Image (spheres, rainbow, N blue to C red):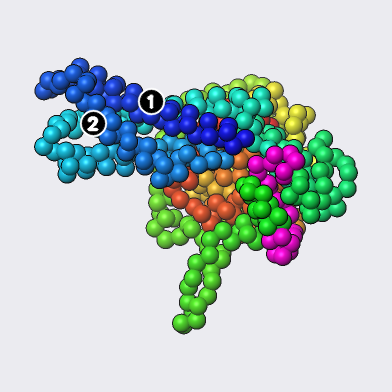
Amino acid sequence: MRRSRIVLILTLILTDACASLLAFYIAYLARLSAVGPMIGPFGDYLDLAAIQLVNTLLVFFVDKFYHRRYVAMLTDEVYRIFGGVSIATLLTVAFIAFVLRERLEYQRSMLLLAWGVALATITLGRFVHSRILRSLQRRGVAAEHVLIVGAGEVGRMILQKIQHAPNLGYRVIGFADANGGPGQVMGLPVLGAIKDLPSIIEAHQVSEVIIALPEASHQELVGVILSCEREKVSIRVFPDVFQIMASEVTISDLGGLPLLTIRDVALRGWKLTLKRIVDVVGASILLLFFSPVMALIALVIKLDSRGPALFVQERMGLDAKPFPMLKFRSMRQDAEAHGPGWTTKDDPRRTRVGAFLRRTSLDEWPQFINVLMGDMSLVGPRPEQPAYVEQFRQSIPRYMERHREKAGCTGWAQVNGLRGDTSIAERTKYDLWYIENWSLWLDFKILLRTGLRAFTDKSAY
């Protein structure tokens, strides 16, 4: 397994090196065909290409591009590559300006072109490398052997997440539990008790241990971690609710008395104004471009079944105040004759057109009007009906704190697969994490992921 990791790192370095050199050659060809001063043969620029290559690999090493990463979303990868290649290019310019100014001439325009092309070639190279690796791992080649400590509800949830994400390259070999009795959990064996962890790790060549004991005491958790550390495996811990909500701790004072702030809201002050500007501009553009499609959808709904094209439902938004949320009607007119109810897969209340609209999330588009009116934001916690809010606030800790921000058309929980008939407690954790860690880049990333999976989301029904 260690050999496979070394091969993985070496092939990734080779991929980045080839992509960097290819970018420089493409930039040379572009500069050669452009109008301007004549340039020499490509051989005259090999020194410059080599300096750029060394700087790129050096920056990537320092920025841990070749460490094992687990949730490498395309948006995050592009963001990191942009930063890494930009710093490498600046280092190349500085090195030439201060060290080789007398000996080496270079075209700044070509170096700028090489920077832009490298963003595309390195991203493409890493994407292809990732696809090949995931394909091999699905066949059991170079897969990471994972042991889940804790066979309870959290352990089962982690197993389901891994099984639904084969691209992670994980192969769960089984569970270790406090009781350690023989048996199976969701088709996988319980390999022993927690005290047997060292022997389980060695016997099954475990490379990573995921501890799913959110209710364990501090002493118990430390004991489990120490047992795993002796075997030199990667250790990941599923945090309890407190750890998730208190993701960042800051120090403040009260009249000179030091205090720890563990619950804070990232969205305040000028950030609220910035988010509102993005909401208004984004919703206006989307309504402008999609209004012909929305008019066509409304017409098809009217022709398909009796009733209005738009469905207005009361939802709870900012500060738990109700507002009328707009959607395209996707169910029969009498769908809530016996009261509100969760939408289920293959729900018989859906119309023929409505089933398609829900599967593709087109029924949500009228909410851009809610965004313009100020009732909603493009990104935020999904709003619920008042009856459900009253129910959830009694059973889910800190549920009402998700109403500290405007409800959103999409959100961090939704792009992580938590929509439809899924755990409200889990959604709440994701919503609160979003509120406490908001950034404009996070909003853009959520919107991009929503757009990419809009027509392929299996949890949309």
Q: Amino acid at mark 1?
A: Cys
User: Residue 61: x, y in percent?
Assistant: 41, 42
**Is 370 covered by the magenta stretch?**
no
Q: Is residue 285 shown above or below 245? A: above
Front residue of 163/402: it is 163
Secondary structure under the numbered disc 2 in the rendered image: helix
Residue depicted at 64% across the width and 47% down the height: 233
Residue depicted at 59% across the width and 49% down the height: 381
Q: Is residue 276 shown above or below 65? A: below
Whether residues under marks 1 and 2 lie with C-beta atoms below 8 angstroms apart, the answer is: no
Neighbourhood count class around disc 2 (C-alpha, 10 Å): few under 14, some 14–19, many 20 upward: some
Secondary structure under the numbered disc 1 in the rendered image: helix
Residue 18, disc: 1
Q: Is residue 144 shown above or below 300? A: below
Name the quarter where the C terminus is drawn.
top right
**Quarter of the image where one finds residue 328:** top right
